[in-house]
Amino acid sequence: MAEKNEKLFDQFPGVSYDEWRAKVEADLKGADFNKKLVWRTNEGFNVEPIYRAEDIADLKTTASLPGEFPYVRGTRADNDWLTRQDIVASTPAEANATALEVLGKGVTSLGLHVESADQVAEVLKGIDLSKVEINIACCVCKAKDVARALVDCIKAAGAEAAFRGAVDYNPLRRQLVKGKEGIDTAALAADAKEMLDIVAEVPGLRCFNVESLLLGNGGAYIYQELGYALAWGAAWMTLLTDAGVKACEAASRIKFNMCVSSNFFMELAKFRAARMLWAQIVEQYKPEVLDAAKMMVCAKTSRFNQTIYDAHVNLLRSQTETMSAALAGVDSIVTTPFDVPYKTPDTFSERIARNQQFLLKEESHLDKVIDPAGGSYYVETLTSNIAAQAWKLFLDTEDNGGFFAMAGDGSIQKAVNESCTKRHSDVARRKEILLGTNQYPNINEMAADKIAATDGCCCGGEKGANALCMKRAATDFEALRLATEAASNRPKVFMLTIGNLAMRLARAQFSTNFFGCAGYEIIDNLGFDTVAAGIDAAMAKQADIVVLCSSDDEYATLAPEAFKLLDGRAEFVVAGAPACTEELKAAGIENFVHVRCNVLETLQQFNAKLLK
């Protein structure tokens, strides 16, 4: 009997987009499709609820294979990224001992910091420089001496051909982070050429840092980090080629150290777009070998969205971030330990950070598949859209004198700081969610005693006017809760639940989350038969805030009664924004909490009234 092959989907008729759209609009029952289902990104384009094959039919990003120019699908024949750990130590000997220890635990790339060139040999003692990627950070004024010392170590090990790594030469760090003096491009070009001469004998040693990580941790949007990173890299290319350096040599010495945030698919698409655009930029410098256009990227998980309270949620954030970078095919990944916002990472948090990558390799096998997102209608469209927005910003930067000029006069920092301010505002209004901080907080957690260190950077001195903000998204909420902890009295919030069962429960839950963000003590209740009983119970508990939780229809009568009975003995709050709000305000009621509130500002006002 002949075998009969059946394709499952052949049994169903095809559905056009117009048919699907008509069905969805019918289900929305008159609600606006674009408002309900279309997402407007911070990158300036819309994300649709569904994508189909026709959406990517004309995209050039789908025409190449992994390893083929313009490298949108990857630069390598595999996806085995390097697991990097940045070593934190107080002495060179301690750094060396820690490095040797973690190399035995699966780490394949090291980030090491030295104070001077004479420490290089000590921190590298016993490390096989032909097998381990080495990345050395130092003060920019010591970079050339450190590079010489590193080259000497490489030559002594006979590892010139096999070595892979970088010296962190970034003259723009002080300008970006501290807002210091402008950039002398002539002096920079002379230093850069000297740096190239120093590393000439080691082809795999990169020495020009594009540290867009600073921009990402400073609150930049995804398209901004990418657009400015491309402009930064192009600035290095122009500086070096104008000084007589061949394009191949210049490109092969640039390393991109980029941030990766928790916007999973957008970040995945960002790295794909980055490789494609960088390849096209390098191509314009006419390199002798097109391989020089391959982008070398180290991705580091974000610090901007890390939190002090409910800090273990940082593990969830960094896990999705690490996964985005891994699926995007970056060259190496640094997973930031979860406790970085409040202390120097310990052996436990560093081990967990390493294991987050090992889980993706050894259990999820993400290193076994090259560009798994390739061909995805959604991701390919995101890649194209992010590339378009980043390219627009890149061209604008070039038209305004290039990255060095704009960083020198503070234009880059101003643009990123504006985005940072907007993002802090979005966090304050819960448009951007930080789980455990501005939404669903652990109201009984205390954090003051665990804070052993504050955010900082390696650039000394006071900040100037043209400095990046570098303030984490959770900082203002954390200051609010720390103020509550430090006060002699912890405000008590009493939920006066009455009336409609469903509405009073929902609004009590909302209010619990709202006031919990300030670390207040929450007193919830099952419900009261009368307003008077609720007010008496609140006073018996010595409540500082009484929140009336009921339905909009019932507020017109219940709220004035409760406000009058309370008689100023505690702050009175109505949970919601009922139609009778103006009438309630006319009766003297001032406080309302609802989804359109600025949560941060509202809680700051209560702190100012209540904390002693």
Image: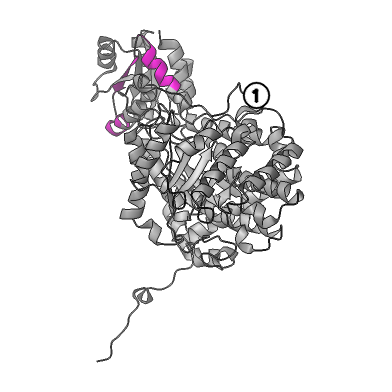
Q: Is residue 259 above or below residue 482?
A: below
Image quadrant containing the C terminus:
top left
Give how far across and how far down residue 270 sits, in percent. Answer: 54, 51
**246 or 537, which lies in front?**
246
Q: Which residue is rendered at x = 55% and y = 35% of the image?
A: 117
Closer to the camera in the image, 68 or 575:
68
Q: Residue at x 27, y 16 (%)?
A: 534
What kind of element bears circle 1?
loop
* Residue 174 against residue 370 in the figure, above or below: above
- What range of the chain is rendered magenta? 479-505
Residue 436 screen position, x and y as percent: 37, 32
- Residue 193 placement: quadrant: top right
Residue 482 is inside the magenta segment: yes
Residue 571 in the magenta stretch? The answer is no
| Residue 574 in which image quadrant | top left
Q: Is residue 218 visible?
A: no
The residue located at (31%, 24%) in the rendering is 445
The quarter holding residue 27 reads bottom left
Nearest the camera: 184 or 537?
184
Which residue, given by chain and number where applicable, does mark 1 sit on? 464
- The residue lying toward the viewer, choosing from 460 and 245, is 245
Residue 112 percent across, percent down from the top left = 48, 38
Q: Is residue 555 visible?
A: yes
**Left or right of residue 306: residue 258:** right
